[in-house]
Image (cartoon, rainbow, N blue to C red):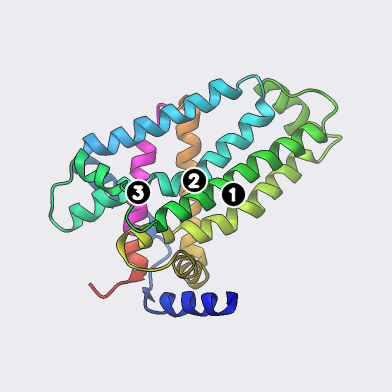
Amino acid sequence: MQFLQTEKALQQSRQFGVKPIPLLRPLGWLARGWSDLLRCPGPSLAHGLILALIGVAIFFLARHRFWLLAGAFSGFLLVAPILATGLYVISRDLERGLKPSFSTVLRAWRPRDGRLVVFGVLLAFAGTGWVMTSASLVTGFTSTPIHEPMDFLRHVVLNEESHLFEAWLALGALLAAPMFASTMIAVPLLLDRQIGVLGAVFTSWRVVMEYPAPVALWAALIMLLTLAGMASLMLGFIVVMPWLGHASWHAYRDLVSTRD
């Protein structure tokens, strides 16, 4: 049964071709994402404000437990692709010459066939698993309680007698890399086309394996902009998150051949 489901997902994935792109094409995605943000600022910035408020809430809930805060923020970023669903819809409507509004975004969040819901639940499980793993790693291998950012910096990052920080980063990368490969194309593809969750994930992996260099550049740009948003006390998230969401739609359109 499992084999049949996998074979069906592979067949669904093969319906879509992978377009060739140059190394620096991700810069073009950012340019087009920025254009979409300027063309539809209200709903876009509302998304960014909501995501920034979620980031602030995470900070205040875990500000005295930095061992939990570090994992919670990175876990939040794992589920960010599904939270950008409304932004993909805005970019799609702009591409079609329509005028998206707040009602357009609200309609995008109405469950239709459950595929995005299922994928969102899977991402939430993955994010929760990383939060728990991260917290267990930091608290289990440090002799000093980690409560504040300076505690994390002093006893984890700058501790020359321990390689805990390196292990924490390696473990995070081990989870983040396949998650990014699975979600880069999958969420906008699920929104745009009738394809199963597993088929969308296979398509995303095909893109990553076909063009690893541009995809690596895109991942680095996402990381840099996200860190900039965090460094601005979450205020930057108001602009950065919708910018990246719109750009991600253009990444999907540039990479996946949908015959339209």
Proximity of marks 2 and 1: CB atoms separated by less than 8 Å = yes
Kindly identify which residue carries mark 1: 126
Proximity of marks 3 and 1: CB atoms separated by less than 8 Å = no
Q: Is residue 19 above or below residue 237?
A: below
Q: In the rendered structure, does residue 240 fall within the stretch colored magenta?
A: yes
On the rendered structure, is 220 left or right of 166? left
Kindly identify which residue carries mark 2: 79
Rendering coords of residue 39 (x, y %): 18, 43
Rendering coords of residue 152 (x, y %): 71, 27
Position of the N terminus by quadrant: bottom right
**Which residue is found at the position 71% from the left and 35% from the top?**
135
Rendering coords of residue 121 (x, y %): 50, 49
- State the SS at label 2: helix
Q: Which mark is residue 85?
A: 3
Say few, some or many: other residues with alpha carbon within 10 Å of mark 3 (under 14 / 14 to 19 / 20 or more): many
Q: Is residue 76 above or below residue 20?
A: above
What separation in Å lies between label 3 and label 2 (alpha carbons)? 11 Å
Residue located farthest toward the front when viewing the structure as drawn:
1
Which span of residues is magenta-colored? 235-251
In the image, what residue type sits under mark 2?
Val
Q: In the rendered structure, does residue 197 fall within the stretch colored magenta?
A: no
